[in-house]
Amino acid sequence: MTRERFTTVGRVEDQGTRTRWTIPVTASSSSYRVTVGPGVLGDLATLLADSAPAHRYAVIADDRVFDLHGAALMRALSGVVRPPPVHTFPAGERNKNREQWSRLTDLLLADGLGRDACLIALGGGVAGDLAGFVASTYMRGIPVVQVPTTLVAMVDASVGGKTGVDVPLGKNLVGAFHPPAFVLADTDLSVTLSREERAQGLAEAVKHGAVLDADYFQDIETDAGALMDGDPEATAVMVARSVELKAGVVSRDERESGRRQILNFGHTLGHALEAASGLRLPHGSAVALGMVLEAALGERLGITEAGVAARLTGILGRLGLPTRIPDRDSLNVDDVVALTTRDKKARSGAVRYVLLSRIGEVAQADDDWSTRVEEGVVRDLLREATAG
């Protein structure tokens, strides 16, 4: 995966051996830019002055990420007139909840931040979702800047304006659309990720290829080893291409009323499995399982081309992601099916699934991008997947 093969809707700047991409996201409520590349964190203060000027700033990050990257962030903010307060929360999906939203909001109020403030979200998808939701509700809405540090956040979670928290009945069921002022994805920050953490983000990149770009999907298959090893150029190009693909969808359907649903491929069953595990199953692993299962579902219904589930199984397995449900003996199929009914694509009580026609193309049904599937078919699929 080389930059010569990359075609961008934005701007590409070559600085010696280091390339950066600036990709626009244009939606009805706002437009913003996503800057991707190695070392771009150094531009943070300049970008704040240009795209998110504020009287005061505050940083929200999970404690683990701030230990790793907080010093670099504060150096990048040295041009800000007033040093920002920093508020951390315990790392992990379990802490993306209403209690942390309330605590962080109260801390910002105690800081005396007004409506002319701006939040900086540093971290993975959990930090971005939580800080974004705080920003969307604080003083009825203040700007937020996303500085993702994981591949999950760089390729997916930081782009598109979805914010929210998890509740006992499911993931992201309380939230708001609140687009960032800009996104700054410094791919150098991903060097601290373990191979397991890297794989979590690559699951979302595989999804982008599966629903939008067969050539990109093949690039990931070809360069799986380099991506897992953290090759700098392959990683930067991968992040930029995923951002470009997602930006193209989000720009045309900001609030997920139509085509943006395709980005939920693998997520209906994936989120249900993640919730059924008590959030012990990492998000990327859950999405990987969801993609394999939903591809198999599409094949069973005659909608998805034969062999798609096997191809997904192959690449996800090479990335170290699960392709068979773990702890099958303890999984309650009825619980998983019940959890799917809380999916945000459900309409009139019916669960809908994003199904592929082939790699790189989503099937449309009744002028919609998701397909209603009878509960019994899903139940049979899950029973077979958990047998033996």
Image (cartoon, rainbow, N blue to C red):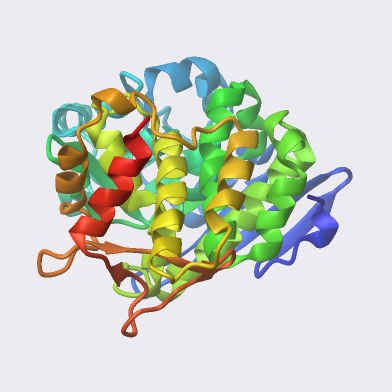
In the image: residue 161, left or right of residue 276 = right
Residue 349 against residue 41 in the figure, above or below? below
Q: Is residue 219 in sight in this rendering?
A: yes
Residue 312 against residue 253 in the figure, above or below? above
Q: Quadrant of residue 198?
A: top right
Q: Is residue 160 in sight in this rendering?
A: no
Q: Position of residue 307 (x, y in %)?
A: 58, 58
How many numbered discs sit on the rendered protein?
0
Q: Position of residue 335 (x, y in %)?
A: 16, 38
Q: Quadrant of residue 225?
A: top right
Q: Quadrant of residue 85?
A: top left
Q: Residue furthest right?
A: 16
Taking the spot 62% from the left edge, 39% from the top edge, the residue there is 186
In the image: residue 283, left or right of residue 223 = left
Q: Position of residue 371 (x, y in %)?
A: 31, 70
Residue 230 against residue 235 in the figure, above or below? above
Taking the spot 20% from the left edge, 28% from the top edge, the residue there is 100
Taking the spot 42% from the left edge, 31% from the top edge, the residue there is 82
**373 or 204: which is nearer to us?**
373
Residue 341 against residue 68 in the figure, above or below? below
Q: Position of residue 181 (x, y in %)?
A: 43, 55
In the image: residue 41, left or right of residue 236 = left
Taking the spot 50% from the left edge, 40% from the top edge, the residue there is 152
Q: Residue furthest front?
A: 388
Q: Quadrant of the C terminus?
A: top left
**321 or 72: which is nearer to us?**
321
